[in-house]
Amino acid sequence: MVFTHDILSFYCINNLRTGVFIILCRFCELRANYDQAQDKIRELERETESQRRSMEEQEERHKTMYLKMYMKGQEAAKFEHADQVRRHKYVHLKKQEKTWFFTI
């Protein structure tokens, strides 16, 4: 009976050792995968940050371009208004000249 108990204890301990060894092997595999995943995460974070900076720079360029376009439009509107005022004065002066000419 003692002999059987010792054999069972030996097999149980042996099974436990085998189980621990399998778990450690699996842990090492998973740890390698985990480390690779962490490296990939860091790489993607760097790429994301680079893309974010690029988009901010592009947005800033667009804002500057739109502001310049707006200012050019304002300037064109001022010139157009000044041109209309000149045309209006010219037409008004011509009417006055005709009126003056016919009144003499």
Image (cartoon, helix red, strand yellow):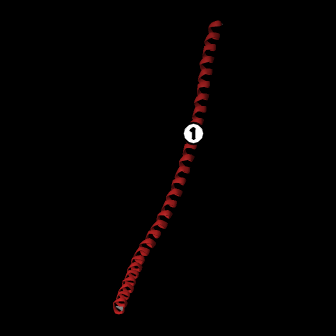
Whole-percent x, y for residue 5 in the image: 36, 89
Whole-percent x, y for residue 76 in the image: 57, 34
Q: Nearer the viewer, residue 56 or 19?
A: 19
Residue at image coords 52%, 52%:
58
Quarter occupied by residue 66? top right
Q: Does residue 17 lie above or below 32 as drawn?
A: below
Q: Nearer the viewer, residue 25 or 1?
A: 1
Whole-percent x, y for residue 101 in the image: 63, 10
Q: Nearer the viewer, residue 6 or 21?
A: 6
The amino acid marked with disc number 1 is Tyr
Q: Circle 1 sits in a helix, a strand or a loop, which is it?
A: helix
Image quarter of the C terminus: top right
Residue at image coords 44%, 69%:
37
Q: Does residue 99 lie above or below 23 as drawn?
A: above
Q: Residue furthest top?
A: 103
**Residue hosting label 1:** 70
Residue at image coords 34%, 93%:
3
Quarter occupied by residue 36? bottom left
Q: Residue furthest front?
A: 1
Q: How many marks?
A: 1
Q: Does residue 12 lie above or below 57 as drawn?
A: below
Q: Residue furthest bottom?
A: 3
Q: Nearer the viewer, residue 7 or 32?
A: 7
Image quarter of the N terminus: bottom left
Whole-percent x, y for residue 70 in the image: 57, 39
* Mark 1 neighbour density, 10 Å: few (under 14) some (14–19) many (20 or more): few
